[in-house]
Amino acid sequence: MSKIKLLPRDEEYRTQEQAIAHHNERKECMLSIPDVFQIVKENNTEAIESLRKDFDPRWLVTSTRIIYNKENLSAKIIHNADSTIVKPTEINLKEIPVCQPTYINKLIETEAGLKYVQALINNNKATREQITNFFVTLSGKKEKNIRLCTPSQSSRRDRQVRSVDLYFYVFGRFDVGDGWFDVNSGLSRGVIINSAKQSKFYSNKAIFDIEEETITIPYIVKS
């Protein structure tokens, strides 16, 4: 059984800020980049195919957030940002390279680039080969068509808080980019993680309890 259950998409476009509030209200965890990495690791082909449909024509907004430093290339990566369902994970990096954009094979050749992508997937032991295979399997694209985008230092001074988004781009490319967490809107996904931290989720007011294997549907009396 898969450790992560990808919930059906909600067709409404939201900013990261709005999407996080939406999933918190539904008592479900919002999909993060490490969740996507785990889905691919589990070889959940059905979930992978479903996610690819979210990458186009808009993009998939994740709960992974980057807060850039105004003065230098250091930054903080937060997975499950502002979640009230699971505890957010924070990773501080001395450098996130400027990628406008940079292809994955070139980026992870450098030590700073490798550490950045390892932090994105929350796995500091991931090898360059594992990272490449992850993005290739997720996107269905060749390595030469996979790129990462990060802002310039001047842009980091203007907008420090960014969401990490996944999307297909022109000429058959797949991009891992960033958007303003309170401006740029796209699709988002909820996930259920089999752990003590998240054993229940809510859908249309019904309560699904994974541990107890029960479904509770509230009885509403209409006047």
Image (cartoon, rainbow, N blue to C red):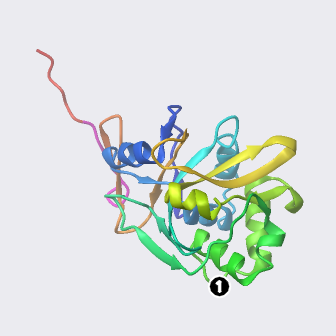
**Residue at point 43%, 71% (across, down):** 89
Image quarter in which the N terminus is found: bottom right
Residue 56 percent coordinates (x, y): 70, 38
When the figure is inspected, residue 127 is found, relative to residue 196, above or below; the finding is: below
* Location of residue 210 (image quadrant): bottom left
Q: Would residue 174 appear left or right of 40 to someone viewing this image? A: right
Residue 80 percent coordinates (x, y): 44, 61
When the figure is inspected, residue 103 is found, relative to residue 122, above or below; the finding is: above
Tag 1 residue: 125
Residue 183 percent coordinates (x, y): 49, 41
Q: Which residues are magenta?
A: 209-217
**Residue at point 65%, 79% (across, down):** 115
Kind of residue sitting beneath label 1: Lys
**Residue at point 68%, 40% (across, down):** 53
Q: Would residue 17 appear left or right of 215 to someone viewing this image? A: right
* Location of residue 204 (image quadrant): top left
- Give the residue at the far top of this rendering: 223
Question: Can residue 1 be seen by looking at this rendering?
Answer: no
Q: Residues within 10 Å of mark 1 (few under 14, many from 20)?
A: few
Question: Can residue 6 be seen by looking at this rendering?
Answer: yes
- Give the residue at the far left of this rendering: 223
Total number of numbered discs in the rendering: 1
